């Protein structure tokens, strides 16, 4: 992915605190396009760990002189029980239309602050299990958002985790801060065996 200069920061990135979203947000920062990050708070086992990762990433940016706007939004999601199916249980954690909820809210936020694009960290590994991480989904949501002058993009949708990790390292993203685990152990550590842990390794 070649750096692309912009006249002004114009991108809102959904920042969950996971490896993919941190790499994506830092890439947008490195090419001068990061206007703001949006983090969503909703009931799930790793909520506090993700929130801590986002806070630390933003703190490091500010220390380095990058004053990126951070927005945190509480969201009500139903049918999210799959997120707590057990520590270390393999397989995806599918929450119906989760990304549509996040993206529609982010489009509203982007329009309100004068941004023109919303990015999120869907990857090639996500496509099989998550309908809201597929190219046709991205195209449909972006088509709807266009009425408000916003484009929705998933820049990593053709990339796998090793490529994303390398891109993040190349642009100086603080990947060591990432939290990529669906359900922490009782001691608050990543389980090491769920899909999110193994794909992010």
Image (spheres, grey):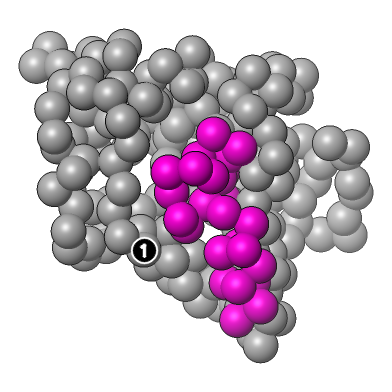
**Residue at the location (29% across, 53% down)?**
95
Q: Is residue 167 left or right of residue 74?
A: right
Is residue 158 depicted above or below 178 in this figure?
A: below
Q: Which residues lie in the magenta part?
A: 120-144
Q: Position of residue 71 (x, y in %)?
A: 44, 56
Residue 62 seen in the figure = no
How many discs appear?
A: 1
Q: Is residue 101 left or right of residue 127?
A: left
Is residue 112 depicted above or below 81 in this figure?
A: below
Picture quadrant of residue 75: bottom left
Q: Quadrant of the N terminus?
A: top right
Q: Position of residue 151 (x, y in %)?
A: 69, 69
User: Which residue is disc 1 drawn over?
Assistant: 97
**Residue at the location (14% across, 37% down)?**
84
| Residue 129 on the magenta span | yes
* Callout 1 secondary element: loop
Q: Front-most of 181 and 117?
A: 181
């Amino acid at each position: 992915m070649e750096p692309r200069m912009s006249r002004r920061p114009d991108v809102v990135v959904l920042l969950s605190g996971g490896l993919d979203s941190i790499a994506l947000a830092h890439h947008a920062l490195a090419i001068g396009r990061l206007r703001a990050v949006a983090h969503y708070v909703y009931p799930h086992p790793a909520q506090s760990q993700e929130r801590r990762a986002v806070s630390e990433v933003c703190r490091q940016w500010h220390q380095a002189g990058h004053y990126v706007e951070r927005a945190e939004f509480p969201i009500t999601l139903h049918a999210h029980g799959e997120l707590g199916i057990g520590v270390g249980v393999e397989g995806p954690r599918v929450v119906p239309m989760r990304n549509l909820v996040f993206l529609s809210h982010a489009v509203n936020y982007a329009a309100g602050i004068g941004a023109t694009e919303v990015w999120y960290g869907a990857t090639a590994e996500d496509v099989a299990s998550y309908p809201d991480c597929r190219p046709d989904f991205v195209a449909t949501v972006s088509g709807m958002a266009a009425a408000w002058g916003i484009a929705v993009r998933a820049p990593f949708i053709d990339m796998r985790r090793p490529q994303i990790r390398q891109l993040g390292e190349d642009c100086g993203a603080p990947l060591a801060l990432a939290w990529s685990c669906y359900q922490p152990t009782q001691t608050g550590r990543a389980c090491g065996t769920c899909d999110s842990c193994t794909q992010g390794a």
